[in-house]
Image: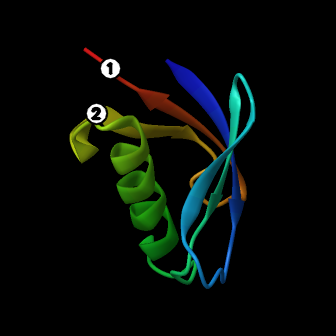
Amino acid sequence: MKWTIRVKLNSKNPRVELINPHELAVSVSAPPVEGKANKQVIELLSAYFKVPKTQVKILKGESSKIKVVEISLD
């Protein structure tokens, strides 16, 4: 399943919010340095969908606030 993710940086409360059926907002506290924010995005999405981190992949937008992420639910 593919999702469009809008990343909000420097949040005090990291969380995942549903915007519409194919888009999520992910608030992260990690800085966008050396992939730390992307790592936290993957951790939050794996907890939200209750899947291992290895099943969450960033397809587009590694260095952007808007990302396309694929989540394998099998």
Label 1 sits on a secondary structure element that is: loop
Residue 2 found in image quarter: top right
Image height check: is 66 above or below 68? below
Q: Amino acid at mark 2?
A: Gln
Within 10 Å of disc 1 (Cα), the crowding (few <14, some 14-19, many 20+) is few
For marks 1 and 2, the one nearer the N-term is 2
Image height check: is 12 above or below 74? below
Q: Are marks 1 and 2 in contact (CB under 8 Å)?
A: yes
Q: Amino acid at mark 1?
A: Leu
- Tell me residue 47's x, y (percent): 35, 49
Within 10 Å of disc 2 (Cα), the crowding (few <14, some 14-19, many 20+) is some
Image height check: is 68 above or below 30? above
Residue under numbered circle 2: 55
- Tell me residue 52's x, y (percent): 21, 41
Structural distance between the alpha carbons of marks 1 and 2: 8 Å
Label 2 sits on a secondary structure element that is: helix
Residue 31 found in image quarter: bottom right
Residue occupying the point 43% across, 75% down: 36
Select label 1 or label 2 by which is in front.
1
- Tell me residue 25's x, y (percent): 69, 51
Q: Dividing the image into 4 quarters, which one contains the C terminus?
A: top left
Residue occupying the point 66% across, 83% down: 10
